[in-house]
Image (tube, rainbow, N blue to C red):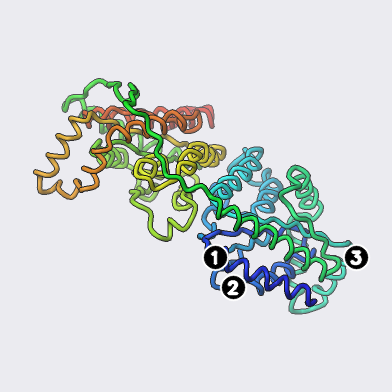
Amino acid sequence: MTKNNEQLSLDVATLTRKTKELGIPIMIVFEGVPASGKTRLSNELLLTLDAKYTHFVPMKSPSEDDLRYQFLQKYWNSLPSKGDINIYFRSWYAYYIEYQANKIKHSIYNKYHALRRQIQDFESMVQDDGYEIIKFYIEISDKKRKEHLKEMKENPLTSWKAQEYETAINDDVYHKEMHKILKASPDEWEIIDYTEREEAINLMYKHIINRLNKAIKLHKQKDKVIDGDFTEDFKTDLFEQSIDKVNKKTYKSLIGDLQDRLKELQFALYERKIPLILVYEGMDAAGKGGNIKRVREKLDPTGYEVNAISAPTDVELNHHYLWRFAKDMPRSGHIEIFDRSWYGRVLVERVEGFATKKEWKRAYEEINQFEKMWTDEGAIILKFFLTLDKDEQLRRFKEREETPEKQWKITDEDWRNREKWDQYIEASHDMIKFTNTDHAPWLVVPADNKKSARIEVIKYIIKKCEEVLWASNNIRVC
């Protein structure tokens, strides 16, 4: 390495210590055809960075099992925590191209036209949350590349690598598709010619230094205004609707048959590889837990999971707020039930001041994009908001306090939330208004009568699943 590059390397190391201190997560992408110099450049960078908070993330070709998960789920799972650095050796771009190349071979999902938009949304969401994404595309002269491949083939210790290159995706296909991406967003990429090694290293370091300096400056200017932005005397009739009350006898005659039908649909969803995501939000003591219990009472436990969401841990707070939920999204054919969810960003975090005004305001669109990533690939997302009269909530709170086996259900936090009833009503109204989409609709469920609410929810799940199953196969299921 030249003296100039040694100094640039030291500058990068110094800046990344600063980004670690400030908690700025860095994502560095290396794309390029095989034997273009990606390995040597990324290794050069790895040796410069502190191994304690630097992670190397190689892209692997999508397997049959990978295709059972949402396209970007593996990249959501591998997001760096605050202050850490991920080096992606080939990334979601190469993964996307291989998906495209294999779309005839694999027929699990067929909406590949949506994947590019998913990539844009994914990058936008993490960048808005303070992540710095630095993207390199490495090129090399054909003569130099052939020399690299020849050296690999002739060395017994590296010949396997040359063979691996030959069996990977066609270089011309990859090169052609990547250049479409580069052309569509030229300002996002730094293209480096590796024909002259020292010059390539020089360019890489200079670009990283420039981007890290900008990231540090932007971080210091970050708006940290905490404001729930509530309206005085806010009024809404969204939560004043009603449903027919179901008596005990009618409930008993309906619930068993509905649960049996739900179990049949669970097997149909599994057979057709359609994931189902059920999201529960609502007032404290509205009966979310009991409702979920009746939904899953007769389901096959090997095919569903329930996520009871509580306050984020320190590890979760060190990631993008959607990270912990993306990790728990279901693979194809399975059911995931969320007892509270990612909507905490626009509910409790807005009301209690845990998110800045900019963070919770942009979250509506981020959540819509996040949910569409899954529905684009065949998932069903149904969201239930269980609403409750304020007097009925007070009655249930007191009943819990006075009933020994229910006392664990009532906490000081429940009483504190009740004091902010009007703010939670406004936050809930805005949440439904801005995130009630065709691909992931909300159902507001009056829950003053628990039995009626349970019947209403199960009927709705059955109806929506039958609609999707009917459309997907044009036949009656079960």
- Asked which quadrant contains residue 464, the reply is top left
Q: Position of residue 449 (x, y in %)?
A: 21, 28
List the residue tagged with mark 3: 143
Residue drawn at 10 percent across, 48 percent down: 404
Determine crowd level at label 2: few under 14, some 14-19, many 20+ residues with C-alpha closer than 10 A: some
Quadrant where the image shows the C terminus = top left
Please tell me which of labels 3 and 2 falls first in the chain. 2
Q: Quadrant of the N terminus?
A: bottom right
Give the left or right position of residue 316, taking residue 122 as reference.
Answer: left
> Could you say whether the residue bearing mark 2 is in a helix, strand or loop?
loop
Find the distance from the CA under tag 3 to the CA under tag 2: 34 Å
Q: Is residue 278 visible?
A: no
Left or right of 47 on screen, residue 334: left
Residue 239 shown left or right of residue 221 in the figure: left
Q: Are discs 3 and 2 less than 8 Å apart at CB?
A: no
Residue 469 x %, y %:
48, 32
Q: Amino acid at mark 1?
A: Lys
Q: Amino acid at mark 2?
A: Asp
Using the image, tell me which numbered label, if any, was put on residue 50. 2
Q: Are marks 2 and 1 in contact (CB under 8 Å)?
A: yes
Q: Residue at x 56, y 54 (%)?
A: 219
Residue 252 picture location, percent across and down: 20, 30
Looking at the rendered structure, the secondary structure element under dot 1 is helix
Give the left or right position of residue 411, taking residue 127 as reference. left
The residue beneath circle 1 is 20
Residue 94 badge: none
Pick the front one: 373 or 122: 122
Q: Amino acid at mark 3?
A: Lys
